[in-house]
Structure formats: structure tokens, C-alpha cells
Amino acid sequence: MLLISLTPIALAASAPINSELSSSDRAKFDEILEPVMMIYNFIKYIASVIAVIFLAYSGIAYMTSGSDPKKRDQAKNIAGYVIIGLIIIWATPLIGGLLV
């Protein structure tokens, strides 16, 4: 248990935190990151298309719910979750940029 608790301290002490990357290191990092970003963009656009379909479904479900409050609430929940999901998917690079 002691070894596990001391490992992060040893790793933090071994690497300088405020060191700047050289241009070659930055180029290597960008080279590694390029396919990851391509996959992310593909997933982002596929998820956006699926989100539009679910938003249309929730809108139709809301309009056809009539006086049934349970169906109306279910349609509102679907739309809310879709919008939250889209915000998370589209804001991920911004959040990652702030952290790195």
C-alpha cells in the first residue's frame, strides 16, 4: 500500500512540469494526434447525425403525446439528454485544450 501511495510522488519528482517542448517533439506529438483527431471528428459527426434523428423523434413524440404527461416528460428527457450529449461531444476539444 505504501508503494502505491508513493508512486505518484516519485513520478512527479522525476519529470519537470514546466519544461517547454521542442519543435521536433511538438511535431511528433501532432503526428500522433492527427489520426486520433480524425477518428474523433468521424465519431463526432456520426453522433451529430444520430442526435438529429433522436431530436426529431423526441419532437414527434412530444407532439403526439396528447394529454399523457408521462410521454411528454419522456420526450423532454430524450431531447435534454441529446442536447447534453452534443454539448459534451462538441466541447471535448475545448476542455482538452484547457487542461493541456
Image (tube, rainbow, N blue to C red):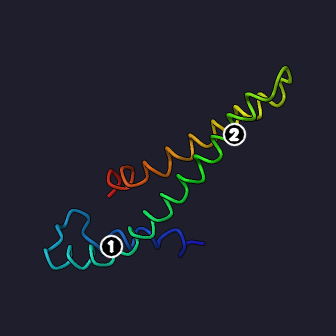
In terms of sequence position, does the residue under pointer 1 or pointer 2 come before the other?
A: 1
Count the marks: how many? Answer: 2
Contact? badges 1 and 2 (CB < 8 Å):
no
* Foreground residue among 43 and 92: 43
Residue 77 % position (x, y): 70, 35
Name the residue at the top extreme. Answer: 67
Instruction: Check the image and report above or below for 53 versus 40.
Output: above
Q: Which residue is mark 2?
A: 78
Residue at the spot x=75%, y=35% of the render?
61
Whether residue 24 sits left or right of residue 58 in the image: it is left
Q: Quadrant of the C terminus?
A: bottom left
* Foreground residue among 31 and 65: 65
Name the residue at the left extreme. Answer: 23
Residue at the spot x=40%, y=72% of the render?
36
Instruction: Check the image and report above or below for 52 versus 72.
Output: below
Instruction: Check the image and report above or below for 32 versus 56.
Output: below
* Foreground residue among 62 and 100: 62
Q: Quadrant of residue 22?
A: bottom left
Give me the disc on residue 54.
none
Q: What amino acid type should be assigned to the residue bearing mark 1?
A: Glu
Q: Which residue is mark 1?
A: 34
The crowd level at tag 1 (other Cα within 10 Å; few <14, some 14-19, many 20+) is few
Instruction: Give the distance between the C-alpha atoms of the residues marked 1 and 2, in whole angstroms.
Output: 33 Å
The crowd level at tag 2 (other Cα within 10 Å; few <14, some 14-19, many 20+) is some
Q: What amino acid type should be assigned to the residue bearing mark 2?
A: Ile
Q: Quadrant of residue 69?
A: top right
Of helix, strand and loop, which one carries label 1? helix
Residue 32 % position (x, y): 33, 78
Of helix, strand and loop, which one carries label 2? helix
Residue at the spot x=19%, y=67% of the render?
19
Whether residue 68 sits left or right of residue 26 in the image: it is right
